[in-house]
Amino acid sequence: MLDKVIFFFFAGVAILSAALMVTRRNAMHSAVFLITTLLATAGIFLQLRAEFLFVAQIILYVSGIMVLFLFVIMLVRLDVALNQIQFARQKWVALIVTVTLAIQVGILLWSARKLPGDGVLFSAAPAEMLQPNTETLANSLFSAYLLPFEIASVLLLVAMVGAVVMAKKRTTLP
Amino acid sequence: MSPATQALLEFLRSWWVELLSGVVIVAIVPLVAGYVVLVERKVMADMQARLGPMRVGPHGLLQPIADALKLLIKEDIIPDNADKLIFWLAPVISMTAALTSMGAIAFGPSFQVARDINVGLLFIIGISSLGLFGIVLGGWASNSHYSIMGAIRSMAQLVSYETAAGLALISGLLLAGTLRIHGIVEAQEQYGVWFIFLAPIAFFIYVVASIAEINRAPFDLPEADSELVAGYMTEYSGFRWSLYFLGEYANMIVVASVATTLFLGGWLRPFASVRWLSWLDVLPALVTQAVGVYCLIRAGKQPVAVQTKFMWAVALACFALAAILAAPLVGPFRWRFLMRGLHGAFWFLLKVGAYIYLFMWLRFTLPRYRFDQLMGLGWYILIPLGIINIFGVGIAMILESEYGWNRWLALVVTTLVTLGAAFFLLHLNEKRKAAASSAIAVAKEAVAGDIYAG
Amino acid sequence: MMPAGYYLFLSFALFLIGAIGVITRRNVIVVLMSIELILNAVNINLVAFSRIFGDVAGQVFALFIIADAAAEAAVGLGIIIAFFRNRETVFADEMDLLKW
């Protein structure tokens, strides 16, 4: 019962903040609503008993990536942007495409009811049989997935260098 | 009764201890933070050879209450073009992050709101890093130059020193082997020494980084009065400002608790695993007794009558506390959990108090860092040193387990190597600063002759 | 643990909202934020199914997606800053230097 309440709370917050995020005129408000969406996603991870991912999401996504976004929003002048049109000219085409996609996936999920067993509503083993999440994740990260781990670190280094190079001011003297 | 009510009662029945502790934290921590402010003012006065607040209540002890009342009834000013939603939200985020991260701190072996989370330490670090948004959004929403500059500087500083603090904590976690708070303290009990002696450089990095994390002097450029008129807090007044302020002091307690748990042995008494020193268990009661006796002696020498009565009351309270602390040692109350609980809380609070005293000491002794010096210290010195320290501690552990070296020899050798690397980093930093200033000098000379340049 | 369909639905709803944001908004920063929303929706899906099948590979993949999103956000925001310095705009249809 507690599981259900937590899931519906976080899912509701996530969907509501996401909807608010895409429709705000002020980019700072959008950023704040994205922060709430990310925190709600972290809550869903916690509800799925993935506590390391919960903390990793908060530290990396919310405290890292959103700080980047806030920096850039503060550097870019917003007062001019507030009075302009927010939605592109192709918004109706976009909505039609999205609704089509939604209908397709809806049909997919509906016809999955005919799968053997519970259909798409199958459930997992109860939580008491789980191993501690951090240890399991760390074990597999450093043994089976070591190569992607190293590649990810090289990727982050490349991204750091690239971002610094691109955002640097050109300081040439006259 | 309906299943919803039944489920609610079931929830309350199994979680009432945690809920009660949460309510206690939210109710008590602001009061405690207020008294930490008073202690800071008294310590500041002591270091500046004066007396501090003495008027409001005996020895100024009602000063926090007076301050709280004043802040509550002050006028709530919102700047003209401020973003009202975010202006309201920012101090709330700051305070909420600080109080929520207190939930995972274990003040003793049995005082913890969130019992034994598998990722306890990481939870505290993660949630307390959410307080950054309180600062950033507050500075931006105030719609004022000083605020935005303070917010941007503070954001850059916090993010950099969070990385450095995390790297320092990883060195300690390598030794502990687990992220659970109870597991970390038990690991220190098993090793027999506190981790500050096994990883001193990590402790030093964590001290410096934690001072920068909570925006305290000498790293308090974003909120310094003489620099940015209180920075991101400029436009906040009354209750909102008090939320920021209390959030900062609550953060101080959180950071001190993390350092105490990981490096100073948590709730263990000194020499916790040495059996023949278990007579040290009388120390809490003895220390409290000594404080009570001191209060009695000084009571006769007070100039004002109310202060004499007050010192007698304090002495009585100290004797009562000494009796409570001595109770698990004697006779019929020899309950082991009581001993561990009470004495553990005493030692933990003593260590946290010592750490916070260190913060205050540094605040009133060292001058403020300039912003580029601050960022240089974080990125050029602390983060490389943190990484090298992780290597050092890891190599020491491998030398001990795989090659059979003596643990202390391995750790001393790697600490010396890391110290050598630290001096090398400082030397590189000097060269970099010399190169940068000579580049500026060359550039200035290039345009010095031509008066129409630039 | 809720039945899997609930997580699928949540993940798809977030994905749709993110997709609408990417296609419809003019402000490039909001487009980037919607991309982050899409990545999060995928993360929820991965972690839910990792829990269902008991395989930790889903969570490892989700962790890599988070790291990847950080790299991409950094580079994307660097591009936006560089572009803003040149053209003083953050709107997608005003970035039309390469149009004929």
Image: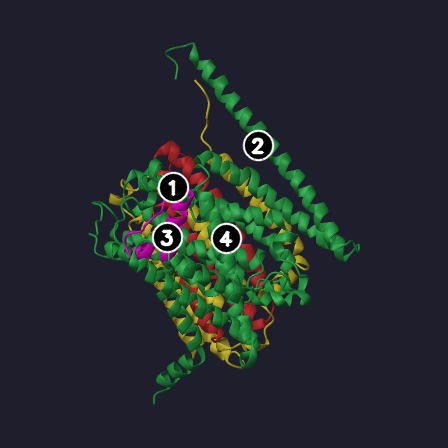
Chain colours: A yellow, B green, C red
> Is B302 positioned to the left or the right of B257 in the image?
left
Q: Which residue is mark 3?
A: B37
Chain bearing tag 2 is B
Spatial separation of the CA atoms under disc 3 and disc 4: 15 Å
Quadrant of residue B98 within the rendered picture: bottom left
From the image, which quarter does the C terminus of chain B lie in? Answer: top left
Residue B453, given in percent of the width and then of the height, sits at 39, 14
Q: Amino acid at mark 3?
A: Val
Please state which amino acid type lies under the numbered disc 4: Tyr
**Which image quarter: residue B381?**
top right
Give the mark nearest the N terminus, 4 or 1. Answer: 1
Labels 4 and 2 share a subunit:
yes
Residue at 41% over, 67% down: B317
Q: Amino acid at mark 2?
A: Asn
Q: Which residues are magenta?
A: B35-63
Q: Which mark is residue B355?
A: 4
Q: Nearer the viewer, residue B438 or C69?
A: B438
Q: Which residue is mark 1?
A: B222
Q: Residue at x 53, y 40 (%)?
A: B379
Query: CB under 8 Å between callouts 4 and 1?
Result: no
CB atoms of marks 2 and 3 within 8 Å: no
